[in-house]
Image (cartoon, rainbow, N blue to C red):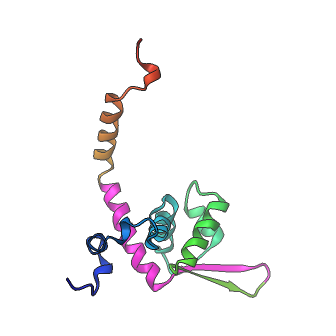
């Protein structure tokens, strides 16, 4: 089997078995990309060429300043986000997607779109599941 471009697909990664290895270096990166805030931050950054921190915070409902900073740092470290600090007072910092970030944003946005398109079906399954499960402390003795 040729390994050329096999990194582009999950099936290629699964065939290699790397993703199942406990020390696989892709696991933390996958965690950063597919975390609750990672997906949303990447989607927000893909909406226009660059954003200021405060703009992202206003755009992403429910995210704390600390979590936004942490998520941006992780994505910057992984090479998905570029951070540009302008030498002005007050400090002005812009965040944008790198080429790698643009590609990853497209992929995770597709996943988010899939979830949005199927949320009613998922919600029905969740309700059905919850209705068939009872907590041990709620059962009659």
Left or right of 85 on screen, residue 140: left
Residue 93: x, y in percent?
A: 67, 79
Residue 113 vs residue 28, the one in the foreground: 28
Residue 20 vs residue 55, the one in the foreground: 20
Q: Quadrant of residue 108?
A: bottom left
Residue 10: within the magenta?
A: no
Q: Quadrant of residue 5?
A: bottom left
User: What residue span does the magenta drawing correspond to?
Assistant: 89-117
Image quarter where the C terminus lies is: top left
In this view, the residue farthest toward the top is 141
Image quarter where the N terminus lies is: bottom left
Left or right of 27 on screen, residue 53: right
Q: Residue at x 62, y 66 (%)?
A: 70
Q: Residue at x 48, y 63 (%)?
A: 40
Q: Quadrant of residue 64?
A: bottom right
Residue 2 vs residue 119, the one in the foreground: 2
Residue 67: x, y in percent?
A: 62, 61
Disc tally is 0
In this view, the residue farthest toward the right is 89
Does the magenta stretch mainly form a helix, a strand or a loop? helix
Q: Residue at x 35, y 29 (%)?
A: 133
Q: Residue at x 26, y 72 (%)?
A: 15
Residue 37: x, y in percent?
A: 52, 61
Residue 110: within the magenta?
A: yes
């Amino acid at each position: 089997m040729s390994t050329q471009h096999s990194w582009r697909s999950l099936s290629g990664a699964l065939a290699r078995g790397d993703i199942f290895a406990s020390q696989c270096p892709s696991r933390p990166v996958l965690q950063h990309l597919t975390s609750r805030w990672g997906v949303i931050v990447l989607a927000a950054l893909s909406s226009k060429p660059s954003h200021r921190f405060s703009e992202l915070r206003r755009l992403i409902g429910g995210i704390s300043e600390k979590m936004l900073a942490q998520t941006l740092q992780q994505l910057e470290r992984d090479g998905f986000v570029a951070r540009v600090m302008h030498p002005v007072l007050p400090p002005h910092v812009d965040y944008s997607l790198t080429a790698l970030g643009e590609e990853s944003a497209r992929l995770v946005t597709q996943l988010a779109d899939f979830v949005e398109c199927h949320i009613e079906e998922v919600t029905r399954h969740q309700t059905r599941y919850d209705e068939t499960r009872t907590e041990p402390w709620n059962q009659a003795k």
